[in-house]
Each structure stands twice: as structure tokens, then as C-alpha cells.
Image (cartoon, rainbow, N blue to C red):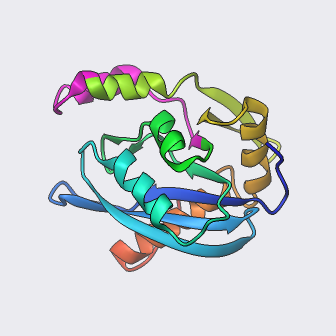
Amino acid sequence: MRIKKEIRILGIDDSNFTKEDKKVLVVGALLRGGFWIDGVVSTYIERDGLDATEKIGAMVNNARYKDVRAIMLKGITIAGFNLVDIEELSMTTGLPIVVVMRKMPDFASIEKALDNLTEKQNRLNIIKKAGVIHEVTVQETSEIFFQFNGIEEEDARELIRISSMHSNIPEPLRVAHIIATGVVKGESTKKP
């Protein structure tokens, strides 16, 4: 993959939600190289459901932005434990997927939490399909973790590096979080 400094990356994050919320707002912020916002898309997914992959895929494919070159997610769990199958999302959209996490997931705790939800084995399979978790240094001193599909490891690292301008979280994800939280809560919160 040829990565230009102004590559268009769609960062996707969910909004804040409560246990009473059945649907959760998910926002995609399209940024050019982590500098300029070129657009925003949104959809709603079921809290703790299994429709995230389908709804996000439809959101991306139905958007008028045809110059998106990669999708970034802040973890594969969204809206609680609605899991994104990154392999399927990559195939559905024809785009590479890069998943970014601040810390290494606690898989024992995740598996225990899944005991409270339907289709536990299906959810575990989606987690396993996401692949190996890698570490990357951004901002010269911060380490974050990532997974990827439809892209080479070194290209995924480069996407994270060039889009992490103001924090260790890439700008497309930071902006998506700010927008989603601002819409739902009336103002944004500090940490994505």
C-alpha cells in the first residue's frame, strides 16, 4: 500500500451510552492525514448486540466519500460488547482496517463478561479472528497496541504514526470520539 502523508482515514468510535440505551450512536470522522476533517458519517448499533460489522460496513459503503483509503477503529468492541469482525469489514468495504487500543486487552475479564451475553462462542471467534496484537511507539515515548486486516503490518504502523499528531491516539479516532460524545452528551470529554 502506498501511504501518502495526506491519506484519507475514516476513524470510527462510539458515543457514551447507559445501560438503558438500546441503540448507540457510532460516528465516523474522515480525516486527511490526521490534519483536515473532510467529512462525518454516523449510524446506530445495538448495545451489546451483534450488528456492528454490518452497520459500520453499510455506513462506509453508503457514504458519498469514495476516497477513503483506510478505516481505524478504537478496539473491536463497540457499544459495549458489540464486536466488529475486522476481516469481514475489510472484505465488505474493500478497505484495510487498523484497530488501535491504549492498553493490552484483559482477555480473561472479557471472556468472563461474555458469560452474560448471547452467542458467547461467536463473539469469542470474532475476537480470535482479529489476530495478533502488536505494539507501536507513537509520540516518541508512548506505546499503543494495534491489530489489522487487509494491510501489511508495517503499513498499519505507518498509518498510526502519521495520524497520531496530538496524542498517542490517531487523530481520526480522537475526532470521531469528540464528535460522538459531543452529540450525545452536549459536550465532548477529554479522553477518547
Q: Is residue 50 magenta?
A: no
Furthest residue in direction bottom, as rendered: 186
Comparing 1 with 181, the one in front is 1
Residue 188 visible to the viewer: yes
Asked if residue 37 is positioned above or below residue 82 in the image, the reply reads below
Residue name at image x 56 percent, y 66 percent: 29
Residue name at image x 55 percent, y 35 percent: 103
Asked if residue 106 is positioned above or below residue 187 in the image, the reply reads above
| Residue 176: image location, x then y, percent | 53, 64
Residue name at image x 16 percent, y 31 percent: 116
Comparing 161 with 185, the one in front is 161
Magenta stretch: give its range. Answer: 98-121
| Residue 148: image location, x then y, percent | 61, 34
**Would you identify the image quadrant in which residue 90 lies?**
top right
For the image shown, how many numbered marks are present on the structure?
0
Q: Quadrant of the N terminus?
A: top right
Comparing 14 with 19, the one in front is 14
| Residue 131: image location, x then y, percent | 54, 23
Asked if residue 186 is positioned above or below residue 175 in the image, the reply reads below
Comparing 165 with 65, the one in front is 65
Residue 192 visible to the viewer: no
Q: Is residue 113 magenta?
A: yes
Asked if residue 189 is positioned above or below residue 155 in the image, the reply reads below
| Residue 3: image location, x then y, percent | 82, 49
Residue name at image x 49 percent, y 60 percent: 60
